[in-house]
Image: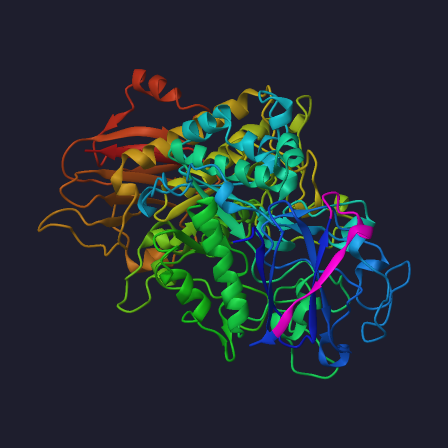
Amino acid sequence: MDGGVDVAVLAPHATGIDLCLFDADGTVGSERQIRLEGPRHGVFSAHVPGVGAGQRYGLRAHGPWDPMHGLRYNPAKLLVDPYARALVGTLGFGPTTYGHTVDDDLQGDVFGLADPRDSAADVPHGVVVDLAALPEEDPAANRPWTPWSETVVYEAHVKGLTRLAAFLPRELRGTYAGLAHPRVIDHLLRLGVTAVELLPIHAFTSEPHLVAKGLTNYWGYSTLGFFAPHAAYATAKARKAGPAAVLAEVRSMVRTLHDAGLEVLLDVVYNHTAEGGPGGQHLSWRGLDSVMYYAYDGNVPATYADVTGTGNSLDFRRPEVVRMTLDSLRYWADVVGVDGFRFDLAVTLGRGVEGFTPDHPTLVAAATDPSLHGLKLIAEPWDVGPGGWRTGEFGLPWAEWNDRFRNSVRSFWLADPARAAHGLPGHRVRELATRLSGSVDLFGGGSPPLIRGPEASINYVTAHDGFTLADLVAYEHKDNLANGENNRDGTDDNRSWNHGVEGPVPLDSPAVDLVPLRRRSIRNLFATLVLSAGTPMITAGDEMGRTQQGNNNAYCQDNEISWVRWDSTAAWRADLLETASHLLTLRREHPALRSLRFYTGTSHTDGGLPDLAWYDPTGEVFSHDRWHDPALRTFQMVRTARPPLRDIVLVVFNGSLQPEEVVLAQTEGDPWLLVWDSVWEHPQEQREAAIGGVLHLPGGVTITMEALSMRVYVTR
């Protein structure tokens, strides 16, 4: 047509919407306002000729200022278009960014007068992006489509993964392009992961209380634009070239990872926005239609129904909110080409009039939409509202973070030994056994029963939120003082164990002898994670012993506390990387470790071995009473692949503080081959064990398991 753009803005309670156009530099004095027509069905719209790619813009909304009833229209405030494909400029944190009148300390009556000061100079502007002009290479065209049974997730932060990577050119460190650099890809492939799950890359901002402390929102769980990539992660060259170049860099990252066989999953935050509670900033949704976008409790004065703990929750009882979420997901799937999503506080997305339901329109639509069909959908299956813990209730095709797995593994290897060292009882092994075998108690429901398999369980021991693997074995108490909240933030339920001394142990310390046991505990935790039935998720840097210095809530630490270290000269870190790679290779090579179905304890064939069997230290099959024996800390697990494959794996666990004698379980066929022992600092010690003649052992032979150790045997 005439090269213009079509504009449509949803704001049912508004009386008028202005489209505000700015010159290329965003000069406030250049603003040109165009009143949109409408509303029709709550939508204001217009065709605006002469507007093309690169145009900076914002919105102003007219309507009643009636905060007692949730209506907060203030045309003095420039608003971000919720559908903006790009944002430029930085957000200010002064009084002008608030819809209600506040003083210089940002204090004021939430239900008081509207603030008359113009905010255009203090908020980001949207930018028109011509998607048709993007490079022709479609990042969705070369998706690896990795089956769930082969998936290993690597949770990473775009900036934090490569910010300290001295092997990268300086201009690439901490960027989208840096993440897709061949050296980084080689590391991921060498490790053996198949999918990179990125912490939020939707455009986000920091919370005012962090800015006041000189801190920032490092993790990115404070969204300002569900369609715009976070520009700060792009290279300086791309940022200078403009929003289209930033988007192109993101797409190039995705395509390059795809070329290497790696999927890209996005951690997405649709449950709340950056605007905070009613006293927060006036940036977008609040100014367009607060009572439509946000959930209220129905009281007067109007108060948000906050089930996210952030001050606000988007209202998924509203079709408009569901539509915005689905539109965003489709955009990132179709245009950017990502392979799936991890939904932060996903229970909020499934809350209807009567609370959470797995049949909520948002969840059903995400599972059935043609653009999303076949992509990986992962729920964080809880929020902080009533009935907020819903692990196991999302149904096909969803997978879910399994916090019960995390707690069980930490308890068995760390919290229970710490208690035993003081003569206190621990947990029974039956809980760990349930997690090792795929958590059928959580994910075996549905219609028909057992329709989901073990892969629905996203198993993890660590995540971005909490201690790193190295810190789990070195700290019993969080050290979050750097966060500026007097160590009140972050969980106290860490189930960690410092092995006798809190924090780092210097080489000249009398306690240096405990360090090897710490390293063994790390190996135990990692091996339990990757050898369990389900989908393992590894936190970036854990494979190299990354520490956050005891901080278990580093959401505001955009510094070396959070960034991954690549340049350590410590030999144990290199050994750990080799161990992690070896264990993931075992998982990949042995189908018995990657079951598509829940175990039944029965044989695949007449007279054959059961698909899963448990043995006590004497080599006897577990009896009912043994499962309830609180003193039992040593056991064996045998898993068998389905025909026609003949693959049998035996894993022996000793969670006791003392060495234990174990009679190896007996099976048909060849002797057991020892392929890994957590006592080994490096997998090459397998060769040394072979020289000693201890690799091939028949069932029924008695072995000695070192304290707090595990072994893996195989036979084909």
Nearest the viewer among 696 and 150 is 150
Q: Give the quarter of the image for residue 667.
A: top left
For the view shown, which residue lies furthest in the left direction?
606
Q: Which residues are magenta?
A: 23-38
Q: Give the quarter of the image for residue 640.
A: top left
Lateral position of residue 702 relative to residue 24, left or right: left
Residue 510 location in percent, x, y?
Answer: 67, 26
Q: Is residue 376 visible from the viewing direction of this image?
A: yes
Counting labels gives 0
Residue 48 location in percent, x, y?
Answer: 62, 58
Q: Give the quarter of the image for residue 393.
A: bottom left
Residue at 27% in and 50% down: 596
Residue 552 location in percent, x, y?
Answer: 64, 46
Position of residue 264 relative to residue 517, above or below, is below
Nearest the viewer among 19 and 692 is 19
Image quarter hosting the C terminus: top left
Lateral position of residue 173 relative to residue 260, left or right: right
Residue at 63% in and 71% down: 37
Residue 677 location in percent, x, y?
Answer: 38, 30
Position of residue 693 relative to residue 431, above or below, is above
